[in-house]
Amino acid sequence: MVASFLKREKYLAKEKKYEKALSEIEKLDKQVQDLEKEIKSYQALKESDKEGAEQYTYFIQSFLNRDDIEIKLDEVTKKFILLRDNQNASNLSEGEKTAIAFSHFLVSIKALESKNKFKDYIVFIDDPISSLDGNHIFQINSLLKEMLFSNKNPGGQWEIRCKQLFFSSHNFEFFNLLKELPLNKKESRYFIERNRASNISEIKVLPEIFDKYSSEYHYLFKEINDFNRLRKPLDSDKLLVIPNILRRFLEMYTLTKFPSSENVDRRADKIFTPEVSKRICKPFHFFSHLDNIDRIGKQSEYMADIPIACKELVNHIKKKDKLHYEALNNAVTN
């Protein structure tokens, strides 16, 4: 009876058809899963491209310090387009080209960091401000610090995010900002010296005058302050050059207090009082100008006034301009 029933109902054929249908369903399910993965992949790529465009725009606008230029993703062509005031950008300046190129570099760094690969890279950055004006130097310096350095322990030692980092620049203002970046003691500083006669260039250790001092003003203060600390300043071999150093420093210092067209003596009178000003200015006026042939063959008793002038100046800044004095000291001792 059972066999007759199965035969009558064509059970075996139906079972085979059912199994075939299940197999087809499994294949279709697999195709659906594959297509869903592909859709997610395209969505992720789209989101990644969109995010990349947003990062690109952020860097460009940070460089230029304005928001008229941006990068957007064309939804049809899936390509990036460069816009200025929502119109296709053209006639880009050299500065804008530099900003766009360097922004692409920073976006690439972001991509490497997201894959935890940037730590294995050696990075060389050659003069990123070459076509930008001085107003952009600080933006670039801030971006470099944000992208290339990390401080895992607040208040502790900063570290570079990559394996090794090189900077090159011909811009002294940018160079001074680089020296302020939180680099560790492993850093080295060099300069390229070119001999035009032989057309040969050499990489040499950076001279101390550039390495230690950010400006002539800092250097002049250090020379005066060191001379003032000597127990026997009249025995110093710098005694006769100090008046010129004193004059240069006073010209700058008095201008920071009174940025006027008045001469250094009048500015000094207002800062130090006429009596103190005379004691400070007399030595550098006398030794900075050779206007008497008799001085060629003899020394002057005014040499004894040089240490007094330095002491008057340093004591005034230390007592009356304490913040300025501390800032100068920090600048020449770090």
Image: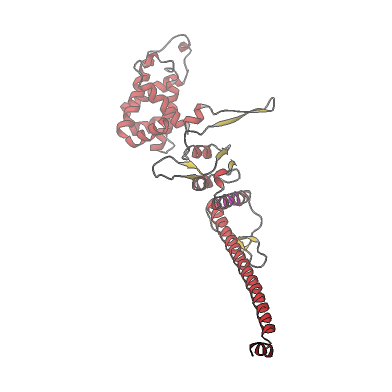
81 inside magenta stretch: no
In magenta, the rendered stretch is 102-110
Rendering quarter of residue 42: bottom right
Q: Residue at x 42, y 38 (%)?
A: 260
In the rendered image, residue 210, in percent from the top left (x then y), is placed at 51, 30
Q: Which residue lies furthest to the top in this view?
A: 297
The x, y position of residue 227, in whole percent, is: 39, 21
Q: Is the magenta stretch mostly helix, strand or loop?
A: helix
Can residue 46 be seen here? yes
Q: In which quarter of the image is the N terminus?
A: bottom right
Query: Going 66% across and 78% down the picture, which residue do you hit?
Result: 19
Count of numbered badges drawn on the protein: 0
The location of residue 276, given as percent across then percent down, is: 32, 27
User: Dividing the picture into quarters, in which one does residue 254 lie?
Assistant: top left
Q: Looking at this view, is 105 or 119 the one in front?
A: 119
Front-most of 242 and 78? 78
Q: Is residue 246 visible?
A: no
Residue placed furthest toward the left: 319
Quadrant (top left, top right, bottom left, bottom right) of the C terminus: top left
| Figure check: 144 above or below 308 | below
204 to the left or right of 223: right
- Which residue occupies the foreground of this view, 114 or 24? 24
Magenta-colored stretch includes residue 109 = yes
Task: Give the quarter of the image for residue 54.
Answer: bottom right
